[in-house]
Amino acid sequence: ETGVTQTPRHLVMGMTNKKSLKCEQHLGHNAMYWYKQSAKKPLELMFVYSLEERVENNSVPSRFSPECPNSSHLFLHLHTLQPEDSALYLCASSLGSYNEQFFGPGTRLTVL
Amino acid sequence: KQEVTQIPAALSVPEGENLVLNCSFTDSAIYNLQWFRQDPGKGLTSLLLIQSSQREQTSGRLNASLDKSSGRSTLYIAASQPGDSATYLCAVNPGGSNYKLTFGKGTLLTVNP
């Protein structure tokens, strides 16, 4: 595997379910990001981890809970989501804050 | 608060045409600017990163320019091909301890054969 991978690629869940999104980077980077992309809106940064420590939390509702167990893996735990949370969730990584961000293919989430 | 605007929102051109996509930003205190390509329902592919000290960067048929003082960047695509059809996004990076890229809404490019 190379680059940034995300699983699952598609997820349909009910409002009472609990699920997790997974991201893995194989680039030796030390920063990882979660973004949300909704229709007709710019990408929104949700969370940033640098050296496994959360450095940015962009006023995201508590029903989204990130976890970064090491510099290669990032999770987004989901519970009691709302239909308006349906979107494409993108993971990215970079070497520090100054360098290019590389993105994964995304998870298309649908909340029923 | 940094705001990024991309014009036009959509562009349709015949194959072979040269074209320019525009990106403007309100705060010139940026460290770099990145251009991405996004195919429908897919992730972002980094095309070019241009540092604030640079005027332009080139990769193949793509050329990105940056005028930091006026808050503008352009992405020039030469000899466009149907495979170039995608949404093109620009994002500005403030650098330092601030990891937040600010994105524009993108330009949807369609190249017709």
Image (tube, grey):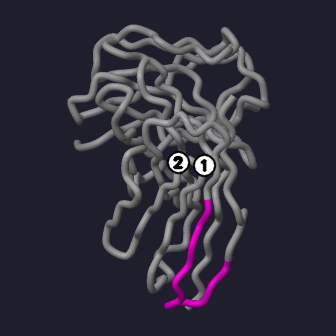
Q: Chain of mark 2?
A: B
Check chain identity for marks 2 and 1: say if they share one: yes
Q: Chain of mark 1?
A: B
Magenta highlight on residue B15? yes
Pinpoint residue B8: horizontal percent, then vertical percent: 71, 66
Residue at 68 percent across and 14 percent down: it is A59
Mark 2 highlights which residue? Answer: B68
Magenta highlight on residue B106? no
In the rendered image, the vertical position of residue B40 relative to residue A15, given as above or below: below
| Residues under numbered marks 2 and 1 in contact, where contact means CB atoms less than 8 Å apart | yes
Classed neighbour count for the residue bearing mark 1: other residues with Cα under 10 Å, few (<14), some (14–19), many (≥20): some
B55 and A22: which is toward the camera: B55
Mark 1 highlights which residue? Answer: B71
Residue at 71 percent across and 20 percent down: it is A81
Q: Determine whether the residue tagged by mark 1 lies in a helix, strand or loop.
A: loop
Pinpoint residue A48: horizontal percent, then vertical percent: 47, 20
Q: Which residues are magenta?
A: B12-22
Pinpoint residue B12: horizontal percent, then vertical percent: 67, 79
B63 and A49: which is toward the camera: B63
Residue at 39 percent across and 39 percent down: it is A101
> Left of B44 or right of it: where is A93?
left
Q: Amino acid at mark 2?
A: Lys
Please tell me whether the stretch drawn in magenta is mainly helix, strand or loop. strand
Q: Amino acid at mark 1?
A: Gly
